[in-house]
Amino acid sequence: MVIGLLIRGGLVAGAVYYTRRAGVWGNTEQTDKLYNDVKDQLRPYVQKAKKQLPFELPQLPRVGEMRFLAKHYYNEGVKSSFRFVHMLPCYAGRGLKKAKDTFEEFAKSPAIAASEHQQQVQPASK
């Protein structure tokens, strides 16, 4: 568990370091330049794929559209994160209740659990 956490942490740190060096987290001019560079590098591959595919590929979004989409999805992610944090006590309460019920079920002797199961099934079959 600890090793997995260290590996994941290392991967995240490496991804953040690489994207920072590439200019993703820089100012808007750096990010626009990076986007255009990536777009130019992918253009030959996209042209090759267009020739082989039986349908038309849409154009890549312009920088302004990309900026709008990035802001929109970032904001949606922040809202969802806060919604999750807001609901966390409810989720934790449900999880603890379910765990408690499960442990209580396991703590019962098999004879008691079987007789209770029989009583629950019989009224439903009448």
Image (cartoon, rainbow, N blue to C red):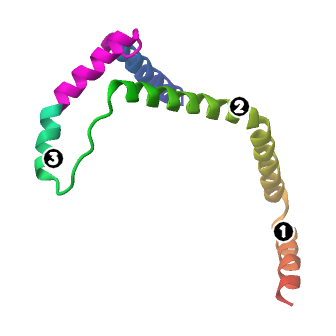
* Among the 4 quarters of the image, the one containing residue 59: top left
Which one is in front, 24 or 117?
24
Q: Which residue is mark 1?
A: 113
Q: Residue at x 17, y 39 (%)?
A: 46
Marks 2 and 1, Cα distance to the nearest angstrom?
A: 37 Å
Of circles 1 and 3, the one toward us is 3
Q: Which stretch is magenta?
A: 21-42
Image-based side of 19 in relation to 106, left or right? left
Marks 2 and 3, Cα distance to the nearest angstrom?
A: 44 Å
Decide whether residue 28 is among the magenta residues: yes
Residue 78 vs 92, above or below: the answer is above
Residue 57 vs 116, above or below: the answer is above
Q: Which kind of residue does numbered mark 3 sit on? A: Lys
Within 10 Å of the Cα at label 1, are there few (<14), some (14-19), or many (20+) other Cα atoms?
Answer: some
Q: Which kind of residue does numbered mark 2 sit on? A: Val
Within 10 Å of the Cα at label 3, are there few (<14), some (14-19), or many (20+) other Cα atoms?
Answer: some
x then y, percent, for residue 39: 23, 27
Q: Which mark is residue 85?
A: 2
Q: Who comes first in sequence, dot 2 or dot 3?
A: 3
Q: Which residue is mark 3?
A: 50
Residue 23 vs 66, above or below: the answer is above
Residue 81 vs 20, above or below: the answer is below
Q: Which kind of residue does numbered mark 1 sit on? A: Ala
The answer to whether the residues at label 2 and label 1 have Cβ atoms under 8 Å apart is no
Image-based side of 91 in relation to 18, left or right? right
The answer to whether the residues at label 1 and label 3 have Cβ atoms under 8 Å apart is no
As helix, strand or loop, the secondary structure at mark 1 comes to helix
Which one is in front, 92 or 115?
92
